[in-house]
Image (spheres, coloured by chain):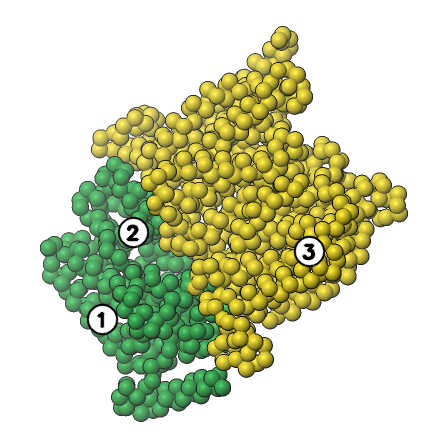
Amino acid sequence: MTVSLRGETWLVGRVLIVAISAFGTLCLVYWHAAFGIGAPFSTIIGSILAAPVDDPAGALLHYLRLPRTLAAIVTGACLAAAGTLFQAATRNPLASPGILGVTAGAQLFVALVTVVPAFALIVPHTMAATMGGLTAGCITWMVSRGSGAGPVRIALSGMAVSLMAGAAAAALALLDESTGASLHLWGGGSLVQADWRASIGALIGFLPAILLMLILARQLDILALGDDTARMLGQNLFLVRGAALVLGVWLSALAVTLAGPVVFVGLVAPNLLRMAGVSRHIVLLPSAIIAGIALTVGADLLVLRLSASTVELPVGVPVALVGAPVLVLLAWRHAGESRAVTEFADRYRMHHALPKASRVIFLFVLLATACLAGIMSGNDFIDFGSVGAFLTGSAAADLHNILELRALRVTGSALGGALLALSGLLLQGVIRNPLASPELVGVTQTSGLFAVVALLLFPEYGFLGVQAAAIAGGLGAALLVANLGLRSNLAPSAMALIGLGLAAFAASAATTLVIGGGFQASQAATWLAGSTYGVNATDLIILTGALFGIIPAAYLLLSVTDMLGFGRSKASSLGLNVRMIEWAHLLIGALCASLVAAVFGPVSFVGLMAPHAARLLNPGRQRDLLAASMIIGAALMVIADGLGRTLFAPIEIPVGLMTAIIGAPFILLILRRA
Amino acid sequence: MNHLDRRKFLGSLCAATCAYTLMSRISQAAVPSPRIVALEWRYADHARSLGVTPVGIADLGEYARQSSVDRKELEASGTVDLGRRQEPSMEAIIAARPDLILGVNFRHERILPQLSGIADTVLYKYTQTGSDNVDQLALMLDELRELGEKIGRADAARTATVGLDDFLAKQSKKLASGQVSARRIVFAQFPSGVNNVRLFSSNSLPVQLLDRLGLVNAWTGRSEGFGFTTVGPERLLVLGDVTFLGVAVGSDNSYTRLAKNPLWQSLPFVRSHKFHALTDVVWPFGGVPAAQAFAGKVAETLLPS
């Protein structure tokens, strides 16, 4: 392969820039090490290898600060390298440890090892994190059906896997309040070190990865040309991709074990450089690593500065501040490029699985059984006869009160499930992606974020203020996605990407706020997972009113949804005001989901699962799915709530976590069908 | 019908309370013992100080461990577990048929309407005193006194308070007469799973107790809202030559992590053997029994054997 002279000078220029930024990063690292200690240069260098005798500053440097500096360097390097590798392997600029679900998977396994000490004897933390990351990564890969999938599909699948793993980790934390709920595990990450062991261990894990990256760099350049070209050039696609992904997972796992979940670094660092025009991996990899180091060390410097006067913040806070705008910018840029191809994979099979009458009977039996089981189970099992006595009003006072409480929660769950199903159906119709649902386009998370903000900043408005904020947040998210997407006539998949960016940002911002806001761990978990706990009659009246108000509008909208599937031009040639209809879909869909978020908090996966389950039962037009989706959504939520109340009684697992945990096998089911 | 019975019962309870305050000479046995449910552990302590065994305690297992009571014994006397302190099981609360529910603002404010529907409910400030410099020991004793007045056992509350005062005075005298040179003290908690340390501010309950023992708090940091400041290990270096009392939470906490670090050995208070890990379960946020156990433990630790 010949390289032109111009190319070579160009390369020299690049190397120079890398060298200058490397020096800048080195200065930043030095500043981090020396911050607030006031030791001379020689002491700082001198205390790298051993603590100087009888010098408290030197001892502090050697035993605490320098391990922390090293931790920041290794974390930044690992995350940036992992992000670069994932992005190259999937050819998706959004692919990064956080968005692919690898961070959440690693975190879940570390949580498991922490809560169940017996596991820790068998598997050390790093191994657990790697296994978790690999498992989550594999699931994402399988769900998105590997390399053939578009960026949107991979990103949406990764987000779904993240939600699942996060829910399971949160449930573990709830079960064991004193040991499981440590902020480190599900907070914003922390670089504070107790000794050299962890940072040096991670560094040792990172070094062999450098060698592998050097070998892979050239192959990744070839892979970037596209699958066909790469294959023609004789590349073993499977091997290269697999190697890059496994290496990326290994690096992410190192970072998670060392510092907990620090998101955005793996996304931001490589993309900043790509925006600056760096594309060859032999340059991109080292420069992304330098940028990642600079970002992490800089963020931790800010943490050090703040902790000198106030509280010790998680390092994820400053990283998110930088990362969020870059993420939106990326989604926007990528959105502009993406092809206007719809991904709606469901072909209408015109045979009916069941005759109509049996379908109707099946659905009502399903819902009735779920509700009855929900009423009968809880802290104590209540038999059928006592439920009958309750219905006729002749139950004893205590029994009456308990059953009344359960009836409220079962009804609330059913209403919420129906609304979520409606939301999923509308959003899947307009975004034309089987994985579109309120939680994957950012509506649910933004609702949650706004609720937390209201709770922290305006506690004087009470719970009503929180609910209003949640609805405003959900609608705001839909408006933002619609405004960015529909105004500029973007493809539906591009809108999904913007929504996804929003979801990732809102979720991490809410977690960060909850932790930074001085909540206790158990309190925080309550606000990050939706639950039917404490639902009252007013809530039910609001939900019922909203549901029956929205159903007619949704029915009208859904009767034209199928035409959107033909593409915008065809639909408008059929005489539809496409723009209007798409706006209406998004806004009404978001309204349903944010109402649920306002009453219960974030509940995921019901909006995703219910329409698919309805389609399994009765493949057909969107409009025909309305009733079936709502009934199935209601039943799903009632079952999830009942399980959450019963499994570990008197300890309750919030319904928002249960739906996500039950959702796991369902994702695999969609995968098998699609 | 049962419902009405409960109303009647509550009414008679009220009447009994009034009667009691009017004719305070009548012996305590005349006052029926109310069924109390405690959603935060301190109020289980308070109820027990007043001679009432709660019929329900949230996270009973952990309460029994923290306050060194036998769980089986508690359960044998009719106490049931109510689930987590955050979001306790409503069904379990109803099934316990309480007359009085005791909770805390920061956890249970949201479910106050439902709780009030079940029984008379009192929510306390607990340790969430915000940035105001509230004396948390006085607050704890005030809560005990109010509860005593509410259930017609003001005498028992007074006795418990006087008992604590006596106990603290005795321990203080012991410390003063002993060879305890370490007057400047820092009290800390080592939380689980992290490398940070919580240092308690002067208004917090444990530090107020230390104050009553004649010890001086050497940590002047700002309270984050619950009476402590969370600091990284680097801040421990600037504490200087103090006596350091620490309580650890869980098995993998910041103490077990930091103690492995050689820097720990070079900390002034570790070098001069003034670091004391209260290894037994010590829970400094409870009521009178917990406070007494804590103060006793501290005095025992500081006095040269």
Q: Name the amino acid, label 3.
A: Ser
Q: Name the amino acid, label 2.
A: Ala
Identify the mark at residue B92; answer none if there is no mark: none
Quarter occupied by residue B133: bottom left
Q: Is residue B148 visible?
A: yes
| Chain ID, yellow in image | A
Q: Name the amino acid, label 1.
A: Asp
At x 66%, y 51%, the residue is: A613
Q: Colour of chain B?
A: green
Residue A380, above or below A438: below
Q: Which residue is mark 2?
A: B248
- State which chain disc 2 sits on: B
Neighbourhood count class around disc 3 (C-alpha, 10 Å): few under 14, some 14–19, many 20 upward: many
Task: Give the side of residue A133 with respect to residue A581, left or right.
Answer: left
At mark 2, the secondary structure is: strand
Neighbourhood count class around disc 1 (C-alpha, 10 Å): few under 14, some 14–19, many 20 upward: some
Q: CA distance from mark 2 to mark 3?
A: 51 Å
- The residue nearer to you, when weighing B240 against A649, is A649
Q: Which residue is mark 3?
A: A629
